[in-house]
Image (spheres, rainbow, N blue to C red):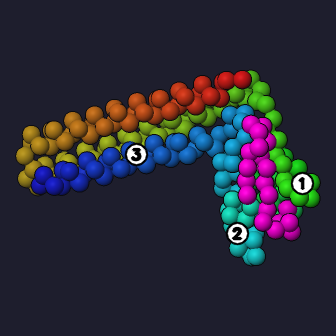
Amino acid sequence: MNEDVELITEETKDRMQKAIEHLEHELARLRAGRATPVLLDGITVAYYGVNSPLNQVSNINTPDPKTILIQPWEKSMLGTIEKAIMAANIGLTPINNGEVIRINIPPLTEERRHQLVKQVRNEGETAKISIRIARKWANDELKELLKSGLPEDLEKNAVEKVQEMTTEYNSRVDKIVSLKEKDVMTV
């Protein structure tokens, strides 16, 4: 029985950690006025009949904080990559000079910064919901174990441990969201 409780708490911790990792991934994709190759994650291009991620058919660099430079491995891919970036509708315009594709990151307006902060807060709330779902799952599993003979004091201790993890992970979400808000609002 005690091993079951340990498995439940470990599984809960894994679920909460995945919520944090997902939050960090989503926030990395939000444009805070700085060039980063992560902005192009999720863009795929047709490469010899197969949809391939952009970073697997080209080198992506940031030579300065306002520019992303895409150098395809084959020059024939320039037009395809340019079209894929436009089709991705990420609000960035590629500039094809026949050798490489440049993307200039425009400065953010005050209104856009406030929209991004709202988006950051929504992502944070989504992460907290995932954490609460993990807590509910753990508590339900512990109730099932209690019905099948787990001592009450072990169940109560496990529920308290799950609540402590929930509080810890929620505070981590708050810190991550706060840092990203500060990053977005910095001109």
- Is residue 129 shown left or right of residue 166? right
Q: Is residue 46 above or below residue 105?
A: below
Label 2, secondary structure: give it: strand
- Given the image, on which type of amino acid does mark 2 rest? Asn
Question: What residue is shown at x 66% (from left), y 32% (from top)?
Answer: 116
Q: Nearer the viewer, mark 1 or mark 2?
A: 1
Label 1, secondary structure: give it: strand
Image spot of residue 21 (x, y percent): 48, 46
Classify residue 119 by image quadrant: top right
Question: What residue is shown at x 78% (from left), y 66% (from top)?
Answer: 73
Label 3, secondary structure: give it: helix
Answer with mark 2 or mark 3, whichever residue precedes in sequence. 3
Q: Which residues are magenta?
A: 59-78
> Considering the image in quadrants, where does the N terminus appear?
bottom left
Q: Nearer the viewer, mark 1 or mark 3?
A: 1
- The reply to whether the magenta stretch includes residue 17 is no
Q: Residue 51, labelled with which disc?
A: 2
Image spot of residue 89 (x, y percent): 77, 49
Answer with mark 1 or mark 2, whichever residue precedes in sequence. 2
C-alpha gap between disc 1 and disc 3: 40 Å
The residue wearing badge 3 is: 17
Question: What residue is shown at x 70% (from left), y 27% (from top)?
Answer: 113
Q: Residue 96, labelled with which disc?
A: 1
